[in-house]
Image (spheres, rainbow, N blue to C red):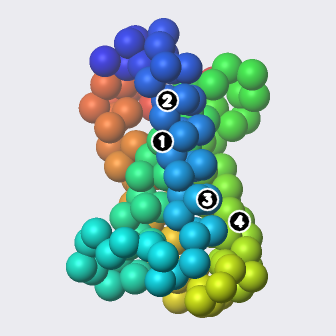
Amino acid sequence: MYKKLKESRVKLLYIPLFFYWIVLFIATTIPAPALPDILDFSDKIKHFIAYTGFAFLLSLSLHFQEKYKKFARYFFIYAIIIVAIYGALDEIHQSFVPNRMCEFLDWVADVFGGLAGATISVMFLKRYIPVKFFRN
């Protein structure tokens, strides 16, 4: 599985991450009443779930990219930093969208979702490379 992800990282990681990120941005740009309420969950749980998926794809993409060795080696930390920054910018962006608000607790849910997604990616990778986890 690890080898397949490494060989097909563009198709299996980069492209899905790209589209996921676009959908995430579009979903937060639509005014609140216009959004269909598909999931009957708390707003914070929706943020948590959305950013868990985002961080999972982002951390794996950072791990498998080969251009920046530091990002590949410390993918967990960089994924959380990127998710936290993007979550903050997204909350600020939502303050300009009609019927949306910038909420600190939404950002907290984003960050915790990012931590969960990055942790899941670490657990996933450890299953396939238990001895040599971080690349040199």
Label 3 Cα crowd, 10 Å radius (few <14 / some 14-19 / many 20+): some
Three-letter code, disc 3: Phe
Q: Are marks 2 and 1 in contact (CB under 8 Å)?
A: yes
Q: Is residue 40 left or right of residue 53?
A: left
Q: Residue 40: where, in percent of width, then height?
A: 24, 79
Q: Are marks 4 and 2 in contact (CB under 8 Å)?
A: no
For residue 69, which quarter of the picture? Answer: top right
Three-letter code, disc 4: Ile
Residue 13's tag is 2
Residue situated in front as seen by the camera: 121 or 127: 121
The image quadrant where one finds the C terminus is top right
Give the mark, 4 or 3, whose residue is nearer the N terminus: 3
Three-letter code, disc 1: Leu
Dot 3 corresponds to which residue?
A: 25
Measure the alpha-carbon separation of dots 1 and 4: 16 Å
Q: Secondary structure at mark 4?
A: helix
Q: Is residue 86 left or right of residue 18?
A: right
Measure the alpha-carbon separation of dots 2 and 1: 6 Å
Residue 57's tag is 1
User: In percent of the image, x 60 and y 86: which residue is there?
Assistant: 100
